[in-house]
Amino acid sequence: MQQIAPTPAALEIHGLIKRFDRPAVDGLELTVRAGEFYALVGPNGAGKTTTLRMIAGLLRPDAGSIHVGGIDALSDPVAAKQIVAWVSDEPMIYDKLTPREYLEFVSGLWGVASALAASRADALLDWLDLAPHADERCESFSKGMRQKIALAGALVHEPRVIILDEPLTGLDAGSARQVKNVLRERARSGGTIIMTTHILEVAERMADRIGIIAHGKLIAEGTLEELRRQAGTDAHAREGGSLEETFLALVAEPAQAA
Amino acid sequence: MSATAGTAVWFAQHESRLVWRDWISMITAGRRERLRVVAIGVVAFILFMHFVAYWVVGPHAGAAIDKQTLLTITTSALLSWMLMISQAMESITRAFYARSDLDLILASPVNSNKLFGVRIATIALGTTLMALPLAAPFIDVLIARGGWRWLGAYGLIVAMGAAAAALAVGLTVALFRVLGARRTRFVAQVIAAIIGAAFVIGLQVVAILSYGTISRAALLQSKTLLALAPGLDSALWWPARAALGQILPLAAVLAASFALLAAAVVLVAPRFGNYAIAAAGIGNASIVRSRRNAFRKRLSPRGALRRKEWILLRRDPWLMSQTLMQMLYLVPPALMLWRGFDQDNSALQLVVPVLVMAAGQLAGGLAWLAISGEDAPDLVATAPVPRHFILRAKIEAVLGAVILIFAPLVAAIAVASPWHALIATAGIAIAAAASTAVQFWFRSQAKRSQFRRRQVSSRLATFTEAFSSIGWAATAAVATASIWLAMAPAVLALLVLGGAYLLSPRARNAW
């Protein structure tokens, strides 16, 4: 009988540690399945951004392992980066480039063939309502437009895993909806999305699974229903309670223990 | 004690606190623990400058008040004044465009005219204070050797600061009215950058064309110029007479300068808010279109990085103004080259080191922009290419730009003397590579818009870059006569570079 090889997880993290003045990430264990929309939530300073920056190859961990799509991101970072895209809360684009030039640059970095890159760029610019501004320099753009350009840059090389750190911060309702639609569509077409957010409603509506991180550790994980159960008998985490109530109940426990 | 809120004095306290903290932050590169070291360094520098001043102006302290003395003082004052206007224009452009508190001030119920008036006066004060440490050693030596009459020179510096600020405000506002908010920023930066250099270069050009020498002194001491100069009783000599301590000219120069400053405050302060609002709105009001055939050919990651760097360098107004200034400094040696074309090679011995020096300085600026001034560091760092690969592409972009600028000049030298062209090529390549290496060793992530402050982020890098460029220029100068003798400055330059490498964060991290 032919054995079917198991599909590698989109992301596997074991014993991840990163210390600055104090432990920022403290023995984190995390697995995200391929094609999953995973939201990482937690209080300020919980270690969310540090974790994502280590996955994206922007920070080197003190200990632990990170595998992206089965590739060891620490021993072969270039291969891992090939299938990953990173979008931060502060869109980092070049003021003096146009969106089209920016996408050309990103395509070049990821080695996308120019004809393919051009058609993808046109489609993305169209999709994100950026086509009328495709040849204007980015210096005059609003935060929402800049974030959409950064997102287009992340999508133009068709990554298997997209990592987003607070992508909706500072966006107006229209831009936020467009970004959410793009991410939802990407997840539907098989991409893996890993996202941090402070907006719990977004995590609740969009994510397949939610991970709650506090003090550098994953303290709870699962669907909203599973999280409610993990929150146990807490009065706030009753049946039908929002993620906000569940989150506050779960985060309060380690804080009290500490 | 604090003044009543909303008064001019209260605003002056607020402004002086901001200016003081900004200045401390600038000289200490944001690390207050360095303050003592920096203070010792400043005192040592001022003491050293007194020795230099003793040697330069000491013998002339007792000069009689004749045309030659008045002409020399007037020219020196005019040169300093040009630099002060340049500094003041830089400050006023920043005040219009980059002061982050403008929204707060304009949204508050206080009368902002007072603050803007104070702000213009503060620019005058700042311009004067920047000039004083450089002028003070010379004035002190003149006082020590020539008597108290030279105290008037301090008064002249104060007058020059006030007049420079007033003129800079007038110029910037005129640009605003003629060109609009968007173009003013770029044009004002260019004018500020070249205005200081233009006077020196102008004198050198006249000296070369008239006397075949780059020396300004030859021009200033020439009989022709002295014959053309106005009589001793002319009002044009009042600033020089003020410096020499004559009370009436000093009072007149001070009164005229402060009247100019007062006029600038009275006329511009009420409109300052409108200009600032116009400047703040340029991001939304103006759209720059850049149609280029993107995606025309397949780009390798290295090619994509190189192309990005070149586009950004080309579209950077601050860099353009700096480059323009570098090119201006090349005008006198280029002129000498042209004049000496059909004669001997003596002009080339001067031109080659100037080119080497300029290449080192230009490469340093470009390298900072390409290596440290990355606006999307996360994007580049997450690209699937090795880190050294990214750096190599950026360095290629820098050296490519240097080649583009200097190749025509070297080609012109090659026509006159292939040997000198060879030395120039080697010197330019080494000086540019050395400056790039310094920026690489001392790289630290920054926004490109912080280019103006790159010198303060690491003084060691700044001094190394300057001394390295000087060292390689000296090497090239000596090499035109003797390759063996050129080893000495070359070894010195290498020692400077080696020492800087050992002290650089890169070496410390490697160990």
Image: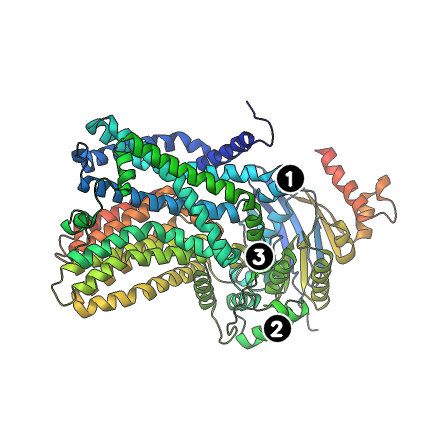
Could you confirm whether marks 1 and 3 are on the same chain? yes
- Residue B364 at x, y percent in the picture: 36, 53
Label 2 environment density (alpha carbons within 10 Å; few <14, some 14–19, many ≥20)? some
Q: According to the image, label 1 marks what residue? A: B108
Q: According to the image, label 2 marks what residue? A: A122
Residue furthest to the top in view is: B1
| Chain containing the residue with disc 2 | A
Residue at 20% over, 68% down: B414
Residue kind at label 3, given as amino acid type:
Gly
Q: Measure how far apart labels 1 and 3 are at the Cα level.
A: 23 Å
Q: Measure how far apart labels 1 and 2 are at the Cα level.
A: 45 Å
Local SS, label 3? helix
Which of the two residues, B46 or A189, is positioned nearer the viewer here? B46
Local SS, label 2? helix
Label ID, residue B283: 3
- Residue B242 at x, y percent in the picture: 29, 34
| Chain containing the residue with disc 3 | B
Label 3 environment density (alpha carbons within 10 Å; few <14, some 14–19, many ≥20)? some
Residue kind at label 2, given as amino acid type:
Asp
